[in-house]
Image (cartoon, rainbow, N blue to C red):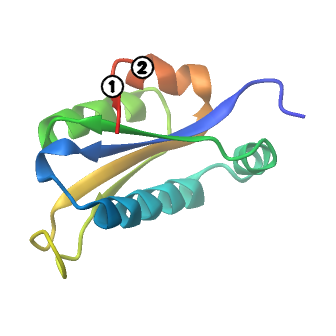
Amino acid sequence: MVATELKQVIIVRADLQLPKGKIAAQVAHAAVEAAWRSDKFLFKDWRESGMKKVALKVKDLAELYAIEQLAKQAGLVTAIITDAGKTVVEPGTVTCCAIGPDEEKKIDAITAKLQML
């Protein structure tokens, strides 16, 4: 059993006002991509502990990039998702960012002030 709580956070841009289905797809892309980039042992522990995920929101692209930069500086895995533009946004639009999976306290140090999606 894992001694510390693990989680993954996915942060979505609120300014895009994406439909629920589009948000779900973008969040899934981010979650999978960040998990894929993770340390395999950390991923295994996170998977065995239930794969906790939290969806949060930021006001715009600048805030998304600021949070991602803080996460990278803290040594956390991140994944920025850029949409293909086949449905509701232009090609190349950055929609969301995943952080982790990693220790909950490390992620919370960066994301605790963000609101739930």
In screen coordinates, is 111 left or right of 84?
Answer: right
Please name the residue that numbered disc 2 is placed on. 112
Question: Residues under labels 1 and 2: Cα distance?
Answer: 6 Å
Residue in the picture at 72% in, 53% down = 40
Residue in the picture at 34% in, 66% down = 21
Q: Position of residue 84 (x, y in %)?
A: 22, 76
Identified by mark 2, the residue type is Ala
Q: Residues within 10 Å of mark 1 (few under 14, many from 20)?
A: some
Q: Is mark 1 in CB contact (under 8 Å) with mark 2? A: yes
Q: Is residue 39 above or below residue 105?
A: below
Q: Quadrant of the N terminus?
A: top right
Identify the element where label 1 is drawn.
Answer: loop
In screen coordinates, is 99 left or right of 52?
Answer: left
Q: Position of residue 100 (x, y in %)?
A: 54, 42
- Mark number for residue 114? 1
Q: Is residue 73 above or below residue 92?
A: above
Identified by mark 1, the residue type is Leu
Instruction: Say how many tags the image has.
Output: 2
Q: Position of residue 114 (x, y in %)?
A: 33, 25
- Residue 30, picture quadrant: bottom left
Residue nearest the viewer, comparing 47 with 18: 18
